[in-house]
């Protein structure tokens, strides 16, 4: 569904003209004839974007913008302020109040629509995070953006031999705290490591003359630079190029000659949004990683371990040994020393078992005090050797108990099941049969004294 846009202007004709342009572009619109009614509509309808006239008699656009930014429910809604007075003070006041952009009347339709599309793309990405079932991501969006903790890295894409001014010196004077580096167009496109990419590419007029606007699409399409922000330095009159740049993925257009305060505010806003997006990506990556691991032992969890084994064999004939490992009398440890002690034993057992793994072995926590070890390309003798070594490793040293002066001795029993390479393909049903066979062997090890290894009498073939 197209975004909903609130138009706030005290002149009826201006509202009608703007509404017609946006309706023709298939946007839904609501209108307000003043600042106070605009603020009420913002709270009632939560539009995706707000267009605000700077000068309104009851409450000017600047005050509306400040009120929206102060309210957690409306602070993330994009705002474009516009005014017939487009001097330095008006532009600066609008950006300082939290507006995403300031435009001079009469509004250029192509640039206005390009800016709207650019801001609504950010809204769509924000809503994707907000609607994500991951509560950590939702909590992150509920918090205000954190202040800068590291120096932002700015890359000036320039052609030094043709530059009419020293862009690096100009940018360093605008934002002394930033790390500013000049880079050529070919060097920018050759970046192949995301860690070497800047936070923001600033494309100068000389670079744009050489490379054209498609440099934006090129940077957006490359793995190393796709998450970096991009802005262009353009004359205020180059509105057609600015609109196209925004459509291609630029975050903003910096008008020349560069105004120190205005440029700084625009760059800070870009970096603030990028840091927040980076934090959300990291949160998602961390959560996806946690979904594959058991939080207590740090081993793969059962579902991920089985998925790894299925991918490894991929239905092909393969020689595989499965070891089902169970800690002996683990319930007694929990009952006598408490579950915290039991958790500590599980962690230490997992650490000890890791020492005896081959590169392609798959060890996971199967459930409770049970672990599953899959050994690709292992025959009966290799599986027996590893299983006996694991029993010795688990039992060789007593286990310390938090808050207790004495330690506890722990042993484990292991059942082994085998699949021969000359037999049937190793599919899901075959894997389940192997696990059941290993479980039968494990129960036999338990019933015959514990702390021992038993192989299923009939190897699966």
Image: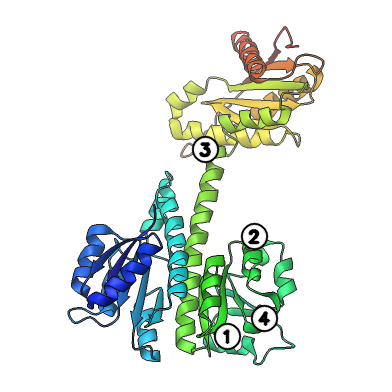
Which residue corresponds to mark 1? Answer: 171
Mark closer to the chain start, 4 or 3: 4
Mark closer to the chain start, 1 or 3: 1
The Cα atoms of the two marked residues, 2 and 1, are separated by 26 Å
- Say which residue appears at 38% left-offset and 88% top-offset: 86
Badge nearest the viewer, 4 or 3:
4
Badge nearest the viewer, 4 or 2:
4
Mark closer to the chain start, 1 or 4: 1
- Say which residue appears at 56% left-offset and 76% top-offset: 241
- Where residue 101 appears, as percent x and y from the top left, is 41, 76
Which residue corresponds to mark 3? Answer: 296
Q: Secondary structure at mark 3?
A: loop
Which residue is more in the foreground, 438 or 280? 280
Which residue corresponds to mark 2? Answer: 221
Q: Secondary structure at mark 4?
A: helix
- Where residue 275 appears, as percent x and y from the top left, is 50, 65
Image height check: is 184 above or below 131?
A: below
């Amino acid at each position: 569904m197209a975004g909903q846009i609130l138009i706030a202007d005290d002149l009826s004709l201006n509202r009608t003209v703007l509404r017609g342009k946006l309706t023709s572009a298939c946007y839904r619109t609501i209108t307000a004839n003043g600042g106070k009614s605009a603020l009420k509509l913002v709270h009632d309808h939560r539009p995706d974007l707000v267009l605000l006239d700077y000068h309104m008699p009851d409450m000017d656009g600047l005050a509306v913008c400040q009120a929206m930014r102060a309210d957690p429910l409306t602070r993330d809604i994009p705002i474009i302020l516009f005014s017939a007075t487009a001097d330095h003070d008006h532009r600066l006041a609008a950006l300082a109040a939290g507006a995403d952009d300031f435009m001079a009347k009469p509004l250029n339709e192509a640039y206005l629509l390009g800016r709207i599309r650019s801001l609504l793309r950010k809204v769509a990405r924000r809503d994707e995070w907000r609607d994500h079932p991951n509560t950590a991501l939702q909590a992150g969006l509920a918090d205000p953006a954190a202040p800068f903790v590291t120096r932002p890295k700015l890359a000036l894409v320039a052609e030094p031999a043709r530059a009419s001014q020293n862009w690096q010196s100009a940018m360093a004077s605008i934002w002394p705290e930033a790390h500013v580096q000049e880079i050529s167009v070919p060097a920018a496109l050759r970046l192949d490591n995301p860690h070497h990419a800047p936070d923001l590419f600033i494309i100068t007029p000389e670079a744009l003359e050489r490379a054209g606007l498609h440099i934006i699409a090129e940077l957006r399409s490359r793995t190393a630079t796709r998450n970096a922000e991009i802005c262009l330095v353009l004359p205020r009159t180059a509105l057609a190029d600015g609109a196209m740049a925004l459509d291609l993925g630029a975050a903003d257009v910096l008008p020349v000659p560069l105004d120190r305060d205005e440029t700084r505010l625009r760059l800070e806003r870009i970096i603030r949004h990028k840091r927040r997006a980076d934090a959300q990506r990291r949160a998602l990556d961390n959560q996806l990683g946690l979904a594959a691991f058991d939080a207590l032992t740090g081993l793969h969890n059962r579902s991920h371990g089985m998925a790894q084994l299925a991918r490894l064999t991929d239905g092909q004939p393969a020689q595989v040994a499965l070891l089902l490992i169970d800690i002996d009398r683990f319930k007694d440890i929990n009952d006598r020393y408490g579950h915290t002690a039991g958790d500590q034993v599980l962690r230490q057992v997992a650490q000890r078992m890791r020492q005896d793994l081959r590169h392609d072995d798959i060890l996971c926590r199967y459930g409770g005090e049970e672990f599953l070890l899959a050994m690709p390309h292992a025959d009966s003798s290799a599986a027996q050797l590893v299983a006996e070594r694991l029993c010795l490793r688990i039992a060789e040293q007593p286990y310390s108990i938090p808050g207790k002066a004495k330690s506890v001795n722990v042993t484990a029993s292991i059942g082994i099941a085998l699949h021969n390479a000359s037999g049937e393909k190793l599919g899901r049903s075959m894997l389940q049969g192997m696990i059941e066979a290993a479980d039968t062997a494990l129960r036999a090890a338990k019933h015959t004294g514990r702390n021992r290894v038993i192989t299923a009498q009939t190897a699966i073939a």
